[in-house]
Amino acid sequence: MLQASDWQAISLTLQLALVTTVVLLVLATPLAWWLAFTEKRWRSWVQALVAMPLVLPPTVLGFYLLITLGPHGFIGQTLEALGGRHLAFTFTGIVIGSVIYSLPFAVQPLTEAFRQMGRRPLQIAASLGASKLDALRTIALPMCRGGFVVAATLVFAHTLGEFGVILMIGGSIPGETQVLSVLIYDHTEALNYTAAHTLSLGMIAVSLMVLAIVYGRRRS
Amino acid sequence: MAARRLVYFLLFISSCAAHAREDIHVAVASSLRGPFTELVSSFAAQHPEYRVQVTYAATGKLVAQVQNGAPYHLLIAADPHYLATLYQRDLLATTPEIFAYGAIALWHPNRTGTPEQLLQEARHIGIAQPRHAPYGQAAVRYLEQQELLEDTQPRFIYAENAAQVVHRVYAGAVPMGFVALSQLHELGVNAADYSLLPSAPLLAHTTALTRKGATYAGAQALQAMLWQSEGQQLLARFGYQVTPKDGESSYVASE
């Protein structure tokens, strides 16, 4: 039913979603922490910047990423000058795109979780002589576990369904940037409706499952 | 520990994509999907050491991707001008060469009449975006010749490429559209459901190796198949006018 190229896209999509989730949790945690507790006046501007991918068309993000990461762009040229390769039409390129595109889905639930916990537990930990790292590991992480799970599942699911940014920056190169959503688009263009149906139904089932897990957790 | 098991499972699936064979990355005009799919499976049977990874899109889009550093080894275009531009910009390793000529057709399922009548009556007309799709450009030139462009243009439904026009007519989203004759052959469309447009220009289909594919034996072998009797017969079966190698490659130079 599914061909080798379909499995290749499924595997690539899962890799992309996994890498994006890990990278985003690492990047979003300190950012969300800062947003939750800072009293700086420009906090709202940083918050707005983080939320931008929610309202910007994916084409805008994809367009600027292609321009900066490609061989004529600032980052792409710098990489080439250092003996590397530019990042347009590469897996690394679509990871960068996905991280930016899903940033609000990681930062917002984490900020919320940190705020709900408040400063109090950490102050108590500090008064009992716990270092900052200790307090983070033994107090904050367990208390905000729900927030981390929600952030991770939302980022994972959102990356599975990503289309516009990836198509702009990655094209549709099998095995490198042709993820499921792009392959489904390709199948419809080829009038390959059976394959398009199979993959689409699979996506619907997985997305529904992931979201049900998130909402199930929220209630408990 | 369900989460850990899930991660292991995902890693397992991810590792299933073995990279044992060498990849040949090919960018192909979307209208060529039918014959090229067959060509690739025949190539794969003869050269099991390679894996052909094909990207189908409008020729103009593929060329824009190459200008932005897309890693293709071999390019196959539905038009001579785009590859000529790449060649002038020093992005190709070989001069673009013609391997076939493609014809445009008007697909009008369950409608009869001359193309001119049908176009005048149609509520919507599917057309590939002329800004980057050669078949869209050929359609515009045809309509200009027939002095129908001004009348029909407001009723255009633009698609990204010729394959998307086929998809929309096939799905019934537009009543008719300008497509490649090869696509109608691929679908086995009844001759009563489409009209050839003899006054429309033929599109010279060209191919070239990129700088990245210049010394890649796999890409060279795949490209050579386009001119071999098997490839040429295949293209002819899909309605292309074929041309022996070096037959008219001066066409590209004169453009």
Image (tube, coloured by chain):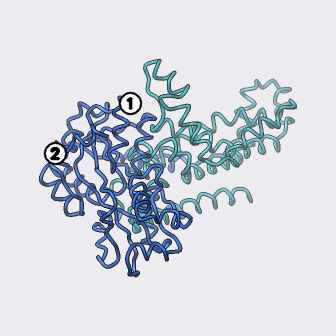
Callout 1 crowding tier (Cα within 10 Å): few <14, some 14–19, many ≥20: few
Residue A125 image offset from top left, x and y in percent: 81, 30
Callout 2: chain: B
**Which residue is label 2 attached to?**
B247
Furthest residue in direction top, as rendered: A82
* Residue type, mark 1 in image: Arg
Against A34, is B244 above or below? below
Chain B drawing hue: blue
The amino acid pointed to by label 2 is Gly
Residue at 45%, 72% in the rendered image: B119
Q: Nearer the viewer, residue A165 or B252?
A: B252
State the SS at label 2: loop
Residue B65 in the image, given as x and y percentages of width and height:
44, 40
Of B83 and B48, the residue lying toward us: B83
Residue A158 percent location from the top left of the image: 60, 51
The quadrant of the image that shows the C terminus of chain B is top left
